[in-house]
Amino acid sequence: MDVKTLPAKIGQLTLENEYGRQFVIPVQAKGGSDKHGAMQTHQDIACCAEKFPTLICRAISAQFMSDDKIALFELTVEDGNIKVVEERHYQLVPAADISASDLKAYSRRRT
């Protein structure tokens, strides 16, 4: 079950339950020439630690690219520096372009 919360002056955070573990997932998104800032990621992670100390923080950044592509990054702080834990790229397509067999195949994937 997902739970959404709206901390004052921070933005919406989503709590997700995966395999019995609970996460808080702050998401920042940028498009065009806008770049992600380290300060925002530090603030997101600090906010999660303060407001949700028992949950696992999985900070996500989304960068919208050209040709309907999006890059998603999971970020963490290591020795005071922002580090990319994982990076994935996705092609955005109209829902009508996704077949029933595509959806079935996607539902079987774990990652």
Image (tube, grey):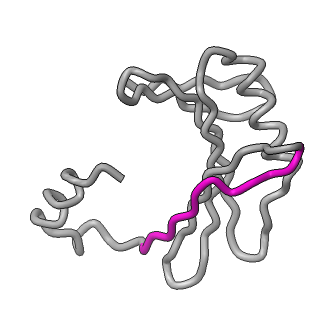
**Residue at the spot x=80%, y=51% of the render?**
82
Q: Is residue 63 above or below residue 110?
A: below
Percent position (x, y) of residue 72?
57, 60
Percent position (x, y) of residue 17?
42, 25
Quadrant in which residue 53 is drawn: top right
Q: In this view, does 45 lie above or below 78?
A: above
Asked if residue 62 lies in the magenta stretch, the reply is: no
Q: Is residue 58 left or right of residue 88?
A: right
Task: Report the label total.
Answer: 0
Q: Give the residues drawn in magenta, as a range.
A: 80-91
The majority secondary structure of the magenta stretch comes to: strand
**Residue at the spot x=80%, y=44% of the render?**
78
Instruction: Work out which residue is located at the far bottom of the displayed protein and give it.
Output: 67
Q: Is residue 1 left or right of residue 3?
A: left
Percent position (x, y) of residue 108?
19, 52
Frontmost residue, 23 versus 84: 84
Frontmost residue, 49 versus 40: 49
Q: Is residue 62 left or right of residue 106?
A: right
Q: In this view, does 55 lie to the left or right of 90?
A: right
Frontmost residue, 18 versus 3: 18
Instruction: Work out which residue is located at the far left of the displayed protein and give it.
Output: 101
Q: In this view, does 79 lie above or below 83?
A: above
